Image: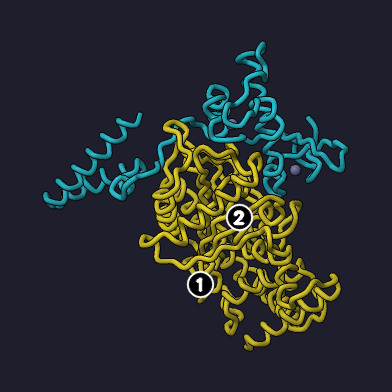
Amino acid sequence: MKKWYVDQGPDSDVVMSCRIRLARNFAGFPYPHGSTPEIRREVMDRTVAALMHGNGGLFLQFRFIDFTRLPSVERQVLVEKHLVSKELAESKIECGVIINDSENISIMINEEDHLRIQCLGAGLQLEELWTLADRIDSFLSESIDFAYDNKFGYLTCCPTNIGTAIRASAMLHLPALVMTGYIKGILESITKLGVAVRGMFGENTETTGNVFQISNQVTLGRTEHDIVTGVRSLSNQIVGQERELRKELLAQNGIRLVDRIHRSYGVLRNARIISADETLQKLSDVRLGVNLGLLPGIDETRLNALMLDIQPGNIQQKLGRALRPDDRDATRASLVREVMQMQDL
Amino acid sequence: MPICQICSQREASLFITRNLNGQKTQVSVCRQCAAESGIVKIDLNKLLAGLAAFTHAQDEEEEKNVEACQGCGMTLAEFNTTGRMGCSQCYGTFAEPMEHLLTRIHGHARHIGKHPGQTEAEESALPGDLERLKSELICAIAEEAYEKAADLRDRIRELERRREART
Ligand SMILES: [Zn+2]
Ligand SMILES: [Zn+2]
């Protein structure tokens, strides 16, 4: 089965992927962290039963991964594929995840809320993902009584998620906005609109690879439809600006930009040791080169997949064992070389 | 005004206390750096807790933190440190301070989206669609497509009826 992240979606020259996440809780049960092992187990069992043994409704193949028996390297891989959160991977309580074959749907069980239904897609297709998440939610609610209040809507562990309990997000690759410095102004105005922005890779302080995630902050007092179209149309605007700037950069600073792209391509094709950070930076340049038609032989979706594959956990899983950082960098370099040479110009 | 510790340029508007290895350190950052660095996300707990404490203090200084949720035993004092509810009943127990808090976070305190057991017909007629249906109706009348207009009119009526029923 083809995984979602090797697909090319709409507006994929700028939007790498998008996600809809719904939080749901079982009525009458305490939230996972203040709960008992027995209740947490029951939440897992009932969710698995509802999804995997329920007939009709959803024509999807799911598998359940119980985290209580899962090695941490394998948990890490799921984090890098964006299928589970870091919090779930590091959780010490009874928890797990349900994933479908093409890995575009994941249902985290016993994270902060009992259920976190996530739908992932390539490119910008938030409306479609919302329709899918909505269907899964409706299907689950036929057999599970969700905590809902007429006034506050769907109740969640954290008050920031209450109401629709929806989080719509898009992952944007914005090299031109970063290079020109316009990104600062954009980030500032976005935050004022009640939309959150954060760097996708790298720890807190800076963004590696020019990849940003934007998502709605308000979940209460607006409909899901409004929230989803809000994030989508904001993404569309940023996409438009990024495209304009790319054209302008190429027109005004052509030779420098082309040089930078080819240098980065050269590094990825030839390096023998490379860190995850450097790989992301160079991949960002190469991706831009592909989008600008400068590196015609390279498949953009391979680059997206590579951004995930070169993360430490994925590298280790490929080799089937834990690695020292030095070995990891060498292994990463050879993986990157292999992919780059496969895509010969 | 203190200066942001990350960019050393803009005024700091967020002050975050972090617990690092048992040692408390205060970080002052500007909004922009906070958004870029993701600090805000991490310390949302503290922010929420601060807001809850504020609204609570206004309401009933005397009985402070005595009331506990019948579902899970959580008190407002506990919420103040974690920023997280213990169970869904907590929202009923602390309905009043919660309403203040939710209004501050979301700008609203009333849900208007999907509800459990919602049918597909209801779904396709959520409030966000009302405006679109109305403009479609105007077009249909202009095009003299009366059958379509009648259908649209019925859908709009149904939607408005349901919207009223809910408020
Ligand atoms: Zn700053
Ligand atoms: Zn409670």
Residue reaching furthest to the top:
B62
Give the quadrant of residue B83.
top right
Q: Are marks 1 and 2 on the same chain?
A: yes
Query: In terms of secondary structure, where does tag 2 sit?
Result: strand
Label number found at residue A8: 1
Residue B73 coordinates in the image, percent (x, y):
63, 28
Q: Which residue is mark 2?
A: A213
Point 85% across, 36% down: residue? B24
The chain drawn yellow is chain what?
A
A80 to the left or right of B7:
left
Tag count in the figure?
2
Residue A248 coordinates in the image, percent (x, y):
58, 65
Query: In terms of secondary structure, where does tag 1 sit?
Result: loop
Label number found at residue A69: none
Q: Earlier in the sequence, mark 1 or mark 2?
A: 1
A59 and B149: which is toward the camera = A59
Q: Quadrant of ligand 2?
A: top right
